[in-house]
Image (tube, helix red, strand yellow):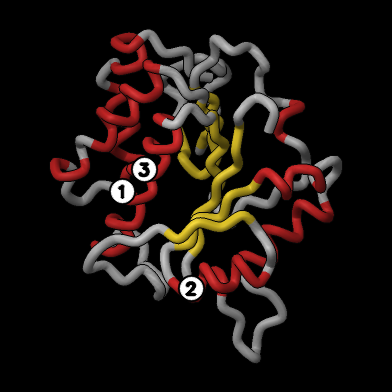
């Protein structure tokens, strides 16, 4: 977009490949929501689909989307990843590393899971104040958008590229080898509970 913001979603074969018994894939449902939503059609040109295997990449190209293939040596991401399995955790951390690279290149980003339906334009709700570094979805809401007690959910968030957010992502990613049994969202929650927002001077809504 004009303000160097890109919408990023990660897909693998399990989300992108259709079989004869299915009318739609998860990727189809995700993309269709931009067509069906109110004021969301223009956003389709600003989506970058990050494919983590060849089938997902080919499907992305077939759909004429903006695509990039993200590979990890020795890891096969093409099948369904059982929640909290080792391959699932590797995929989540690879995603975090990629998003850090995007921020380092100076791009703001919205990250969205592909099971999020875009039925409204989120930019009408997201704060336009550029001093807000991170705006993130929640599992539940305590009544104060600035409270660090809100239980974050990394399935949808908007992050601005600056030194503070890059430091946050670097610290977050550096925890991957010391987080046995935790997904990347749990690690970010731990960092927030440990005071990283105040330490880095972040504004998180």
Q: In which quarter of the image is the N terminus?
A: top right
Q: Position of residue 140 (x, y in %)?
A: 53, 34
Above or below: residue 39 compared with residue 18: above
Marks 1 and 3 in Cβ contact (< 8 Å): yes
Name the residue nearer the viewer: 106 or 180: 106
Compare marks 1 and 2 and give the one earlier in the sequence: 2
Q: Where is residue 62 in the image (x, y as percent from the top left)?
A: 65, 72
Residue picked out by circle 2: 13
> Callout 3: helix, strand or loop?
helix
Side of 181 relative to 43 (left or right): left
Answer few, some or many: residues within 10 Å of disc 3's Cα (few below 14, many 20 plus, some between 14 and 19).
some
201 up-or-down from 114: above or below = above
Compared with 15, 134 (above or below) is: above
Which residue is at a point 20% across and 51% down the rendered structure image? Answer: 181
Q: Which of the labelled discs sits on residue 81, or is there none?
A: none
| Residue at 80% in and 43% down | 42
Whole-angstrom CA distance, mark 2 to mark 3, is 19 Å
Please identify the quarter of the rendering in which residue 17 is found.
bottom right
Q: Which residue is drawn at 40% across and 30% down?
A: 104
* Residue highlighted by disc 1: 93
Secondary element under disc 2, as helix, strand or loop, is helix
> Residue 161 location, x and y as percent?
47, 24
Q: Residue 96 carries which label?
A: 3
**Measured Cα–Cα span from mark 1 to mark 3:** 5 Å
């Amino acid at each position: 977009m004009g303000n160097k913001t890109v919408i990023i979603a990660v897909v693998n074969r399990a989300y992108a490949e259709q079989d004869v018994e299915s009318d739609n894939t998860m990727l189809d449902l995700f993309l269709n929501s931009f067509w069906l939503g109110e004021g969301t059609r223009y956003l389709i040109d600003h989506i970058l689909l990050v494919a983590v295997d060849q089938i997902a990449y080919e499907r992305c190209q077939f759909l004429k989307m903006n695509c990039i293939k993200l590979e990890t040596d020795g890891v096969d991401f093409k099948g369904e990843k059982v929640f909290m399995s080792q391959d699932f955790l590797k995929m989540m951390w690879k995603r975090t590393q990629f998003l850090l690279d995007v921020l380092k290149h100076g791009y703001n980003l919205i990250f969205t899971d592909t099971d999020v339906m875009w039925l409204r334009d989120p930019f009408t709700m997201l704060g336009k104040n550029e001093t807000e570094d991170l705006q993130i979805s929640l599992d539940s809401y305590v009544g104060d958008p600035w409270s660090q007690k809100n239980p974050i959910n990394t399935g949808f968030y908007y992050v601005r590229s600056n030194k503070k957010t890059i430091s946050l992502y670097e610290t977050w990613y550096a925890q991957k080898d010391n987080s046995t049994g935790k997904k990347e969202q749990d690690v970010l929650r731990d960092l927030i509970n440990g005071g990283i927002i105040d330490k880095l001077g972040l504004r998180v809504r």
